[in-house]
Image: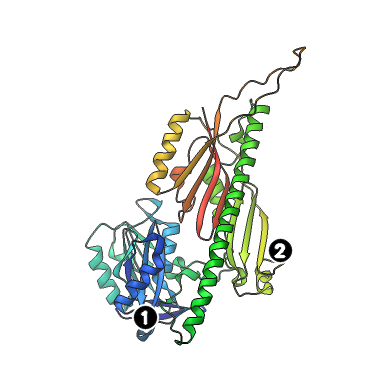
């Protein structure tokens, strides 16, 4: 397939990658490299959407260059995050076609079936060539939506969503193009002089040993942090149940979908001044960020985030901002067995690891001998701590799971591309 490169703003994009699906989720890069060697490609990009993974391949002799962005991968991520408007409302789309005009007068075309690019479903050509391909693929049927320049609406495609290229490219708050590192073309192999390999081998052994220790240390820290958070929330819930049984604590907390929507809207900036986001966390009243320097410098960061606090080592930075989400809702609690069964039935098809831990209410103090102290009545509800690892699913993508009566989220966390949620489930 021919390669076409195009300049959009300050970024160079490439169309025409050859896409192949990957099947080993624990070793995607290795599998992708093995495929690259078989098809003689020296540049590739990995994409993961809707619990699937693909690699896009190209060779530098065809005009592609390291560091260029895959336009098809960027567009597909926008569709995966935002969905598409069809059948009367905005919803996820796994089968879609797209044809948009490029700044240089050429047209870009994408064809995605079951959230996977067709092997030749990424190319750029003249308007006539792209329109011929669009009409040919459309005739096969089974597409959720056709996304395209408004001028294509005249052809009468069912479920047509009019969007220009600019509508499909992610933007920063200042309107500048937001380029993600994962959508960048990377070399399949780095070729080094033979004399370097012995030194590299020794260094690699040291790095592996160090990385193993660091990984274990980070895992222990994360587990300790999670255990402390769960214990603090459990203690707070138990105290609430014991000391104020007449109050309904879920009424004082925001609805989970409203909280998730407000949280995800605040995830920017991801890479302010070139600093890489490591941790993004929302609680009902605050949002916190943690960035890694990533070969950038402090001045660049402070240009975009003036309030960022720099760690003593100069390589990490944090920021804390307020979040306001109204508390409302009049949930009708479900019986415990029904609610737990519903949550597991919804989480398992998504591949979500769900933990539900019962909260034991604190035993009320005994009355004094004179009988003056009345024993508080036990609450009319029970509660469970909830923790779910969503992996690449956003909380909004798991809306069916979290939008349940009596469920409230206490914390939403994004770490290195993986989402997790913590909360409380109140039941009868």
Q: Which residue is mark 1?
A: 4
Pick the front one: 10 or 216 = 216
Task: Evaluate whether residue 251 shows in this view.
Answer: yes
Neighbourhood count class around disc 1 (C-alpha, 10 Å): few under 14, some 14–19, many 20 upward: some
Q: Residue at x 25, y 72 (%)?
A: 132
- Disc 2 secondary structure class: loop
Residue 100 position within the rendered picture, expressed as x and y whole percent measured from the top left: 37, 71
Is there a contact, CB below 8 Å, between mark 2 and mark 1?
no
Which label number is shown at residue 66? none
From the image, state whether disc 2 or disc 1 is nearer to you: 2
Q: Is residue 353 above or below residue 36?
A: above
- Disc 1 secondary structure class: strand
Q: Is residue 30 above or below residue 64?
A: above
What colour scheme does the image use?
Answer: rainbow
C-alpha separation, residue under disc 2 versus residue under disc 1: 42 Å
Q: Residue at x 66, y 64 (%)?
A: 317
Q: Is residue 193 above or below residue 343?
A: below
Q: Image check: 340 left or right of 126?
A: right
Q: Is residue 357 above or below residue 38?
A: above
Pick the front one: 295 or 198 = 198
Pick the front one: 328 or 312 = 312
Task: Evaluate whether residue 148 shows in this view.
Answer: no
Residue 22 position within the rendered picture, expressed as x and y whole percent measured from the top left: 34, 64
Residue 344 position within the rendered picture, expressed as x and y whole percent measured from the top left: 42, 39
- On the rendered image, what quadrant is the N terminus found in? bottom left
**Residue 217's image quarter?**
bottom right
Q: Image check: 62 left or right of 409?
A: left
Residue 70 position within the rendered picture, expressed as x and y whole percent measured from the top left: 41, 73
Neighbourhood count class around disc 2 (C-alpha, 10 Å): few under 14, some 14–19, many 20 upward: few
Q: Which residue is mark 2?
A: 307
């Amino acid at each position: 397939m021919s390669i076409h490169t195009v300049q959009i703003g300050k970024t160079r994009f490439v169309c025409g990658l050859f896409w192949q699906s990957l099947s080993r989720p624990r070793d995607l890069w290795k599998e992708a490299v093995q495929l690259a060697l078989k098809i003689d490609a020296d540049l590739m990009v990995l994409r993961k959407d809707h619990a699937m993974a693909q690699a896009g391949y190209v060779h530098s002799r065809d005009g592609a260059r390291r560091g260029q962005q895959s336009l098809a991968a960027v567009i597909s991520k926008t569709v995966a995050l935002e969905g598409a408007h069809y059948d009367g409302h905005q919803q996820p789309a796994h089968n879609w076609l797209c044809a948009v005009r490029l700044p240089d007068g050429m047209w870009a075309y994408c064809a995605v079936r079951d959230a996977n690019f067709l092997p030749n479903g990424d190319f750029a050509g003249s308007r006539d060539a792209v329109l011929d391909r669009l009409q040919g693929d459309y005739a096969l049927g089974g597409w959720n939506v056709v996304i395209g320049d408004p001028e294509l609406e005249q052809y009468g495609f069912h479920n047509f969503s009019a969007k220009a290229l600019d509508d499909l490219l992610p933007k920063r708050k200042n309107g500048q193009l937001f380029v993600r590192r994962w959508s960048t073309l990377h070399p399949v192999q780095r070729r080094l002089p033979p004399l370097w390999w012995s030194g590299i081998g020794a260094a690699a052994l040291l790095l592996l040993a160090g990385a193993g220790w660091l990984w274990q240390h980070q895992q222990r820290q994360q587990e300790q942090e999670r255990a402390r958070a769960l214990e603090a929330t459990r203690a707070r819930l138990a105290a609430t149940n014991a000391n104020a049984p007449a109050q309904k604590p879920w009424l004082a907390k925001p609805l989970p979908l409203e909280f998730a929507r407000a949280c995800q809207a605040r995830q920017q900036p991801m890479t302010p001044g070139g600093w890489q986001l490591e941790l993004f966390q929302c609680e009902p009243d605050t949002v916190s960020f943690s960035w890694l320097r990533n070969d950038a410098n402090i001045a660049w960061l402070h240009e975009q985030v003036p309030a960022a606090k720099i760690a003593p080592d100069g390589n990490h930075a944090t920021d804390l901002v307020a979040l306001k989400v109204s508390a409302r809702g009049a949930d009708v609690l479900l019986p415990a067995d029904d609610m737990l069964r519903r949550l597991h039935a919804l989480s398992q098809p998504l591949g979500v690891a769900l933990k539900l831990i019962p909260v034991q209410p604190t035993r009320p103090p005994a009355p004094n001998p004179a009988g003056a102290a009345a024993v508080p009545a036990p609450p009319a509800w029970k509660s469970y701590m909830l923790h779910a690892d969503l992996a690449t699913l956003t909380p909004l993508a798991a809306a069916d799971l979290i939008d349940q009566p009596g469920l409230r989220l206490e914390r939403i966390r994004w770490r290195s591309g993986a989402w997790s949620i913590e909360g409380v489930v109140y039941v009868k």
